[in-house]
Amino acid sequence: MSVSATAVAHPNIALIKYWGKRDEAMQLPATGSLSLTLGIAPTTTTVTLSDDPKVAADLGTLNGEEMRGKDLARVQKFLDLVRERAGSQAYAQVDSVNEIPTGAGLASSASGFAALTLAAAKAFGLDYSKAELSALARRGSGSASRSIFGGLVEWLPGHDDASSHAVELDNPGLELSLVVAVLSPGRKKIDSRAAMRQTVATSPFFSAWVEQVPRDIEEMKAAIAAADFTAVGSLAEANAMRMHATMLGALPPVRYWNSDSVAALDLVASLREEGTECYATMDAGPNVKVICRSGDAEAIACRFRSEFDGIDVLVSGSGPGAYLM
Ligand code: DP6
C-alpha cells in the first residue's frame, strides 16, 4: 500500500514585508518579516509516495490540472531536499487544490509550500518540530515559513538554514481582519522571486529598505503588544509603500500597480476620512488588501463591491497554522 499524507495551510499577508534575499540558494531573507495568517482560501495538498519502480520523477496536479514547467520544477527541487533529509529514494505524486487564484499576489505560494512541507514531511517520515517545518517550508518559498503558524507570525531572518524560521507571536487583544479586493485575478507578469532579485541587484533604495525593516519590526511588535490598531495599520501601510518604492527604483522598474490599485488606495484613504479606520497593503500584484478592525470588515467589503463592479472581495480574520488531515 502506498504511503500518503494530506495537509491544509492558509495564506498569510505580511504587515511588515519580506522583500529580498541575502542568500538565494538557502532562501535566507535580507530582513525579518511579520504577517497575519488568514482563515480563508486554504491550500489542501496530498503527497503520495510511489511504490511503482517505473515512476522516475515527481508528478503533480494543481486544481486538477497536470503541473508542468516552472511550477513542477520548483516542487521537484523541494522534494529532492525532503528526500535527502529523509534518506529516501521514493518519488511522489503531489495533488494540490488552491482555493485562491494562483499567482495573483495573493500568497498562493505561501499556503502551497506550507501544505506541501507538512504533507511531504509526514509522508517521508520526517519527525520535525514546528520551527523545523517552518525552516523547511522556507526552502520552498520564503513566505511559506510563516504559514506553518497561525495568527500573528514573525519570520526570524536567522543566519543559516536552521535559524531562519518563523515563530508565533502573542496577540493580547487585536481583532484584525483583512478585506482582499481581487482587482485582477490573472497571473502576474513578473513573479516575486524574479522581481526581488532585480530589486536587490539594481535598486539604489534597497540598502535603505534593509536598514529600515528591523526598525519597522520592533515598532510593529510594540504596537501589537499594546493592541494599538492605529499604530499597527499605519505602520503596515507605510511598510508596504516602502517595499513598492524599492521595486520602483529597480532597473528595469518593477511596478505591480494598475489604475484600479490606485483607485483602491484612494478608497481606503476616503474611508479613513469618513471615520472608518482602515489601512492598505499590497504584495507582488495589483490587488489591494485592507487591514481593519474585524467589526468594520463587512461594511468595507460592501463599499469595495459597490465601487468596483464585478470584482471578488474576500473577508478574513486570523486563521490557524498548517495542519494534517
Ligand atoms: C511581496 O515568499 O513568494 O508577498 O521566497 O522567492 O518564494 P520566494 O518569495 P515569496 O515572496 C513574498 C513576497 C511578498 C511579501 C511577503 O509576503 O512578505
Image: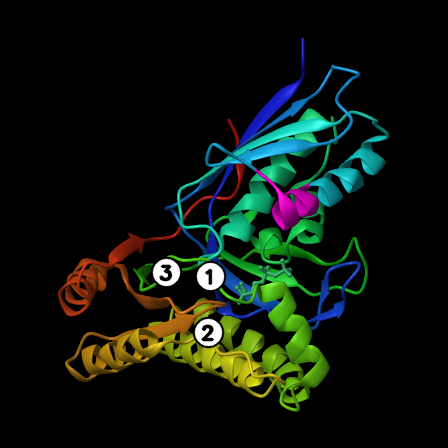
Name the residue at 74% across, 15% down. 51
- Residue 105: mark: 1
SS type, badge 2: loop
Give, as a three-letter code, the residue at label 2: Tyr
Q: Quadrant of residue 1?
A: top right
Q: Is mark 1 within 8 Å of ligand 1?
A: yes
Earlier residue among tags 1 and 3: 1
In three-dimensional space, the C-alpha distance between marks 1 and 3, rounded to whole angstroms, equals 28 Å
If the picture is divided into quarters, which one holds ligand 1? bottom right
Name the residue at 56% across, 83% down. 253
Q: Which residue is mark 3?
A: 173
10 Å crowding of disc 2: few (<14), some (14-19), many (20+) = many
Q: Is residue 283 visible?
A: yes
195 to the left or right of 311:
right
Give, as a three-letter code, the residue at label 1: Gly
Give, as a three-letter code, the residue at label 3: Gly
Residue 79's spot in the image, x, y percent?
73, 38
| Front one among 90 and 23 | 90
The boundaries of the magenta stretch are: 67-75
Q: How many marks?
A: 3
| Front one among 223 and 190 | 190
- Residue 256: mark: 2
Name the residue at 64% across, 40% down. 117
Residue 217's spot in the image, x, y percent?
56, 74
Residue 83's spot in the image, x, y percent?
80, 34
Q: Nearer the viewer, mark 2 or mark 3?
A: 2
SS type, badge 1: loop
SS type, badge 3: loop
Tag 1 near tag 2, CB within 8 Å: yes
